[in-house]
Amino acid sequence: MNFIFRNLRKINLVFLLITAVFCLFSCATNMQKDKRPFIWLADRSKFILLPAKDIEKPLDGYQRISASFAGQDYRMNTWVKADENGMDIVLLNEMGANMGELIFKDDGITFSSSVFPSSLSPEYIIADFQFCFFNASALNSALKRDGFSFFSGVVNEKEIRRIYKGDTLIIEITFNSNYIVLVNHLRGYTYTLEGDF
């Protein structure tokens, strides 16, 4: 009888250890997921940034950005290098001088600038870039998982991408031959990206 109880205790101990290890790895996996950069795409609804491998095609070249927000217009030149390893955006003024750099890798984002405030959230720039240049099926899966719906197709002979929360249109992106227009209806801003896409 003692033999049976001793073996039962050993079995229970082994079972508890296996359960503890499983829980530990399970928690570690959840913690890892929680550390991935994200944005609040809609109130109380976040979009977790996609990994760099989901880019549609590599980019390496000059882009001109025109932005409009709260009645103000902004213009900036950039050099964008983006591929499956990450993204590097160098911000340039009209004279070509470096005004800052934004680097996105799967393990994090760094942003440094002597011109732009440190309160600027680079995650939002990365997200808008992903909405324009990342693989539509990867975006569709991620957005659906996060509670959004995604449309990618041709409307009036133009390639369009739209992101919805319920029936509310949040973002609309229109692709033209050498420029892209992104309108965020919820946040009230517009980007026009010009370049060789």
Image (spheres, rainbow, N blue to C red):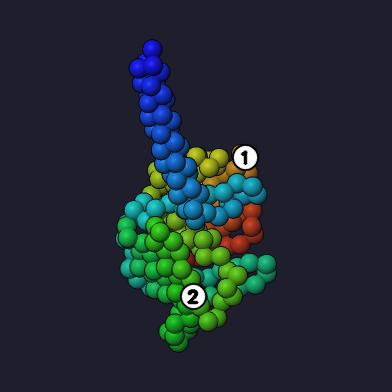
**Label 1 is placed on what type of residue?**
Asp
The residue indicated by pointer 1 is 167
Which quadrant of the figure contains the C terminus?
bottom left
Around disc 2, counting alpha carbons within 10 Å, would you say few (fewer than 14), some (14 to 19), or many (20 or more)?
A: some
**Label 2 is placed on what type of residue?**
Ser
In terms of depth relative to the viewer, which is nearer, 74 or 14?
14
Residue 25 locus on image (x, y percent): 41, 41
Residue 175 higher or lower than 103, as above or below? above
In terms of depth relative to the viewer, which is nearer, 133 or 118?
118
Q: Secondary structure at mark 2?
A: strand
- In the image: residue 187, left or right of residue 85: right
Residue 135 higher or lower than 68, as above or below? above
Around disc 1, counting alpha carbons within 10 Å, would you say few (fewer than 14), some (14 to 19), or many (20 or more)?
A: few
Q: Earlier in the sequence, mark 1 or mark 2?
A: 2
In terms of depth relative to the viewer, which is nearer, 104 or 171?
104
Distance Cα–Cα, label 1 vs label 2: 37 Å
Q: In the rendered structure, find residue 112 and report the number of the disc placed on it.
A: 2
Q: Secondary structure at mark 1?
A: loop
Q: Mark 2 and mark 1 in contact (Cβ < 8 Å)?
A: no
Q: In the displayed image of the protein, which residue is found farthest to the front? A: 2
Residue 156 locus on image (x, y percent): 48, 48
Q: Residue at x 56, y 65 (%)?
A: 121
Q: Residue at x 45, y 74 (%)?
A: 101
Which quadrant of the figure contains the N terminus?
top left
Q: In the displayed image of the protein, which residue is found farthest to the top? A: 1
Q: Residue at x 64, y 57 (%)?
A: 187
Residue 46 locus on image (x, y percent): 57, 49
Q: Residue at x 65, y 72 (%)?
A: 72
**Mark toward the viewer: 1 or 2:** 2
